[in-house]
Image (cartoon, rainbow, N blue to C red):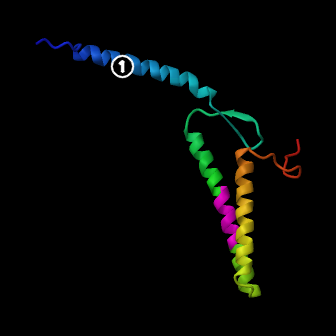
Amino acid sequence: MADSRPPKDTEDAALSERLKNLGDRLGTLAPKIASRDEDGDTVQAPGGSSNLGRAMRLSSEFVAGILVGSFVGWLIDYFAGTSPWGLIVFLLLGFAAGTLNAVRSAGLVAPQSWDRKQD
């Protein structure tokens, strides 16, 4: 019985050619991926690394709002003796502020008129 498979060198050459073609196609698609900066202008992203940075920024905006709100609530409870109401109220306010900051940072909500930069 004869082996009907092509020689190993032919397979390697075909695979190398397919990988080169794929790389060329991905290279032409990369400039088309766009994101928005803080001013709302479109910025070209070279690859996935900016997406990771954007995800880290959004998550840190959200977590920071919650942490600041809970810390302020704890301080109010500690000095005013209103435990646990200050913590509960400011934790909820921090959650709302963190969510709003993350949504604004993602560009899904337009900034308020007092937040816009003056040109």
Residue 62: x %, y % from top left:
66, 58
Residue 54: x %, y % from top left:
62, 46
Q: Main secondary structure of the magenta part?
A: helix
Residue 42: x %, y % from top left:
72, 34
Total marks shown come to 1
Say few, some or many: other residues with alpha carbon within 10 Å of mark 1 (under 14 / 14 to 19 / 20 or more).
few
Quarter of the image for the C terminus: give it: top right
* Residue pictured at 27% horizontal, 13% vertical: 10
Q: Which residue is mark 1?
A: 16
Give the vertical position of 73 relative to 40 (above or below). Answer: below
Q: Tell me if 77 is positioned left or right of 5 in this view.
A: right
* Residue pictured at 13% horizontal, 11% vertical: 2
* Residue pictured at 63% horizontal, 56% vertical: 60
Residue 13: x %, y % from top left:
32, 15
Label 1 SS:
helix
Q: Tell me if 34 is positioned left or right of 19 in this view.
A: right
**Magenta stretch encompasses residue 48:** no
Q: Residue furthest bottom?
A: 81
**Magenta stretch encompasses residue 66:** yes
Of the pair 92 and 36, the residue shown nearer to us: 92
Looking at the picture, which amino acid does disc 1 mark? Ser
The span picked out in magenta is 61-70
Quarter of the image for the N terminus: give it: top left
Give the vertical position of 64 relative to 106 (above or below). Answer: below
Give the vertical position of 88 relative to 19 (above or below). Answer: below
